[in-house]
Amino acid sequence: MVAALHALSAWAIPMFIVLIPLVAAFRKVPVYETFVDGAKDGFQTAIGIIPHLVGMMTAIAMFRASGAMDMLIGWIAPLFSALGIPAEVLPLGLLRPITGAGSLAFATDLIKTYGPDSLIGRIASVVQGSTDTTLYVVTVYFGAVGIRNARYALKVGLFSDAVGFFAAIFACWLLF
């Protein structure tokens, strides 16, 4: 059974790559022209996203380089330590909604420092899988489609990230 799933997994994407043009040709869709039109739209989307990406990356770099993140962590670390939450994972909780690559680099450092089987390493891994890059999604994707007022999406996304962060810690306490 496992071997069959591995074989299916290995062949799934190549089969889709072959199957989609075959189905399109069967339905008399101009496959190549449709592909080229889609690629043109992809370039327009990428060009539209670039200003939002640059703005977000600049804001993240300023937040980290200014020491504001370290100051914020210094303020809330005693409260979290009193609750039994390791202070080492707090920057991950702050970085994750902002940047996926930055939070992944931070989680990697935590795992290298404390080990993958440590409570901190496990919390970092579960936080990475339980939260999302909400500000990135709102900035880049909403900017790409022209949504200016994110109102409830931002609030719900950040609330979901906080719930995911604390749920990850609770699950690690419970399971490990």
Image (tube, grey):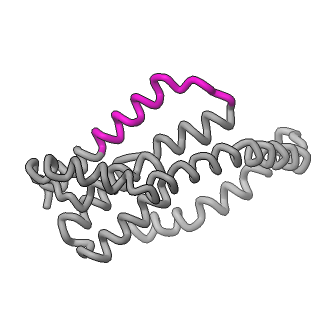
Question: Where's residue 90, x and y in %?
Answer: 27, 54
Question: Where's residue 167, x and y in %?
Answer: 23, 44
Question: Where's residue 76, x and y in %?
Answer: 21, 47
Q: Is residue 23 above or below residue 64?
A: above
Question: Looking at the rendering, which quadrant does residue 156 occupy?
Answer: top left
Any magenta on residue 35?
no
In depth, the one of 120 and 34 nearer the eye is 120
In depth, the one of 16 and 143 nearer the eye is 143
Image quarter (top left, top right, bottom left or bottom right) of the N terminus: bottom left
Question: Where's residue 42, x and y in %?
Answer: 77, 46
In depth, the one of 87 and 43 nearer the eye is 87
Magenta extent: 146-164
Residue at position x 74%, y 58% in the image = 18
Any magenta on residue 150?
yes
Q: Is residue 61 left or right of residue 118?
A: right
Image quarter (top left, top right, bottom left or bottom right) of the C terminus: bottom left
Residue at position x 17%, y 58% in the image = 86
Residue at position x 80%, y 43% in the image = 44
In depth, the one of 56 and 13 nearer the eye is 56
Q: Is residue 109 above or below residue 25?
A: below
